[in-house]
Amino acid sequence: MDSKVTVPAHSGLLDVAALRAKCEFIASANAEQRDRMRQALLAELKKAYQLGREQARELLFADGSGLACAARLSWLQDQLISVVHDFALNHVFNAAMAPEAARITVTAVGGYGRGTLAPGSDIDLLFLLPARPQPWSEPAIEFMLYLLWDMGFKVGHATRNIEECISLSRGDMTIRTAILEARYLCGSRHLFDELAVRFEREIMRGTGPEFIAAKLAERDERHRKAGDTRYLVEPNIKEGKGGLRDLHTLFWIAKYYYHIRDPEELVKLGVLSRHEFKLFQKADDFLWAVRCHLHFLSGKAEERLSFDVQSEIAACLGYQPHPGLSAVERFMKHYFLVAKDVGDLTRIFCAALEDQQAKEAPGITAAISRFTRRNRKIPGSLDFVEDRGRITIASPDVFKRDPVNLIRLFHIADLNGLEFHPDALKLVTRSLGLVNNALRENDEANRLFLSILTSPRDPALMLRRMNEAGVLGRFIPEFGKIVAMMQFNMYHHYTVDEHLIRAVGVLAGIDQGRETEAHPLAAMQVMPSIEDRLPLYVAVLLHDVAKGRPEDHSVAGARVARRLCQRFGLTPKQTELVVWLIEEHLVMSMVAQTRDLNDRKTIVDFADKVRSMERLKMLLVLTVCDIRAVGPGVWNGWKGQLLRTLYYETELVLSGGFSEVSRKERAKAAREALSEALADWSQKDRRAYARLHYDPYLLTVSLEEQVRHASFIRGADKAGQALATMVRTDSFHAITEITVLSPDHPRLLTVIAGACAAAGANIVDAQIHTTSDGRALDTILVNREFSTDADEMRRAANIGKMIEDVLSGRKRLPEVIANRTRGRKRSKTFTVPPAVTISNALSNKFTVIEIECLDRPGLLSEVTAVLSDLSLDIASAHITTFGEKVIDTFYVNDLLGQKVTNENRQANIAARLKAVMAEEADEARDRMPSGIVAPVGAQPGARAKE
């Protein structure tokens, strides 16, 4: 209790004597008018607080010290509470002359009790009552509280006597922790000292292990709720792993167990080295600086370091951009490195605690403890032993004597399924200087590392332990450069090092057959057929190792991998495979998501790049691991289906199975197959329906789908519907399909896309077909939202209804989109420069237009409106989002069915698209139609469901 608090020079924060004099004047001038007295007092206190708070902010910018800022704000609060307390007793309740035994005590508890306060934090107060409280005691407390609340403070409070404090502390660990941090503010000092003495004697004595266990369990649960990783790119600075609460937990335990007032005393006790204590101070100061800036910027107790404030805080702290890394990415890398330091300190501290508790165990307990703690030999190792399921060191010089043991420790732990003793990890952290070039080039060390990487158990767990201990980044310096590196976008959820380790974890799951449900092709067919797994594991670990450099990270990463593979001892063939995989690790994902997989040239071009089945298999698995490890919710069944389609089609080309039969002959065969599939139709109906479709439809749509469409169109025709929709959903592919039958119109896709945006549906793909009788048969694929089919079908039906309402003119598109986006805060955090690429080389029949820009509701509708205005016919659209960025690809022809080859026309297309992406004025958008089919008084089109 009553921690040692170093109050910084609070120059100009508050002239306490002058404030007290003003309060005395207010009391004397308004002695007969209590309401006026209170109003005048409140106004003066508010003014004093605002001036002091603003000064604290200016000093934070001047000296950059977060701890100093938190201490200044705490000191300012102390003075104001003392002034309010004295004013209440002296001028409101006439208790100035009350004897010491009758006085109350105002005590700061919780974080405020430590003498630190963030700008938006709650103020936690404990009002201590004497054994015989006076009639004015509780009314005085009430007066103080209401005044503090009226000043705008969030006050957490409790009013208790000493007996109640002691009794409640026995059964409630939260109250015990709050009183542990209690600090005297004003009132009876004697009462506070009595509580301190009794709390230490009756609560703390002999209960250290119980308190430690409770606090560590509380910490673990907090980490679990926060995501159990310190590498989330929008971390919670207070409650997250490696945040301030972890440091507070260490101090609570130290104060409770070692009976210290200042963390520096841990150095004298031998718990922390001088260097480690400085690390503690630096981490504490940095986290407090970030937290204070965060509260000042947000104007509230915001603890989540979200994207929209990260750039501002980086600027506040003076970070500058470097080649390959923006200022905000440099700031966040520093943040994650500090979070890692907090983890190191926690391990070191826990090791010391365990040793201390073992030494202090009494009599028979100590004997039992020594027996149960007896270290067991680990087969095949003289340097490490087992201590209750945890690997630890056999002697203090184990790493100094043989630095390879720094790698061997993790290998043996993996082989034997052991956790790590804090002593072992503490010595690892203190021995990192032994990881030098000699160790990096050591054949045995590299062999052991590859064994860890390709372990049939849990390689990701071991790599994460190596990374947290600092070994991985030292052993592979190229990996060390991306440790704690974040990418400032909404797509990546983790830092680069955490992403790579998670990718290895996904690969291990596929390799060990645990991912057969999520990835049937990769886990059941592809992975078992890969004979040499080593290049794949190395490629997965290193695929993003060159992030944060000015050049393309795929090309730079391939160069890094070439050097490392030689060091690891891979053969030339294995090395070339790793280099190729890393250089091309994005290509399969991009082709699958942004190209038309029904276009033969897409498949042929991709096959030309891959060139062998071995590469195709490994690239598929690497792509799955990469997408899965980006973050929760990024992978879905639709992406899996696209990758499977690309894999199977490419496999046909590489194995020589791609049909060489002419397009005309294949279309004729497809038309005959459709006719045979409609065997229950009359001959006349079959012939008429077969003539309805053009060759591209017959060649790109599966026979099963063609039969489903036939039934849908026949039903609409019998019902006399000019407009109809049909929906179905697929939980495995995580996709919902909406098929629209409508009179054809150049702006049809524009209206459908706008209606989907208005209904909140995210389009991922669109296939557009026209019939010989002037109708359009468009299939729109949207991301599935609900887990149950019934809920998803209701949602899909609502989307279909919105499409019909807009197409028939019952609703106007600009209005429904405006309703959807009204009140939404536009993101100014990210910038994606609009880009347009127009290519005639990606398809034999179509011009391919690819756009890249910042995503927003209704974007697809606006872009397709421009394409329609430019007299372009869209054959297919492929929509891919990467967080805040969207990449949309359109396969188009001009109105004569030809490619767009004129350079001036291409330039005009690009200019118009860039204008709409940048939300510049464009007449095309102003002319957006309210509907295409507008039958006055027509009945709503029916929706067939499947």
Image (cartoon, rainbow, N blue to C red):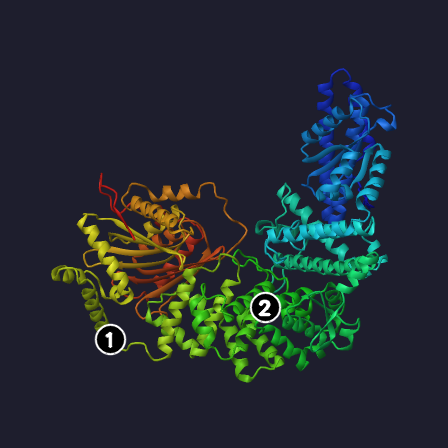
Residue that extends furthest to the bottom in the rendered view of this protein = 572
Q: Secondary structure at mark 2?
A: loop
All told, the count of numbered labels is 2
Query: Does residue 484 show up?
Result: yes
Q: Say what secondary structure mark 1 lies in.
A: loop
Label 1 Cα neighbours within 10 Å, binned few <14 / some 14-19 / many ≥20:
few
Q: Position of residue 617 (x, y in %)?
A: 45, 74
Q: Earlier in the sequence, mark 1 or mark 2?
A: 2
Which amino acid, mark 1? Ser
Image coords of residue 909 (percent x, y): 37, 59
Name which residue type carries label 2. Answer: Asp
The quadrant in which residue 392 appears is bottom right
**Marks 1 & 2, CB-CB < 8 Å contact:** no
Name the side, left or right, on which 447 lies relative to 911.
right
| Quadrant of the image occupied by residue 340 | bottom right
Q: Residue furthest left?
A: 684
Q: Which mark is residue 458?
A: 2
- Residue located at (53% from left, 81% from top): 574
Instruction: Measuring from the top left, give residue 429's x and y in whole percent.
Output: 74, 66
Mark 1 = which residue? Answer: 662
Q: Position of residue 199 (x, y in %)?
A: 81, 41
Rendered-image quadrant of the N terminus: top right
Q: Determine whether 203 is above or below 569 in the image.
A: above
In the picture, measured across the screen, residue 930 lies left or right of residue 121, that is left
Image: 644 above or below 67: below
Q: Name which residue lies at 59% across and 79% down.
A: 565
Question: Which one is in front, 496 or 783?
Answer: 783
Q: Nearer the viewer, residue 257 or 465?
A: 257
Q: Nearer the viewer, residue 378 or 309?
A: 378
Out of 410 and 593, give the one closest to the viewer. 410
Report which quarter residue 116 is drawn in.
top right
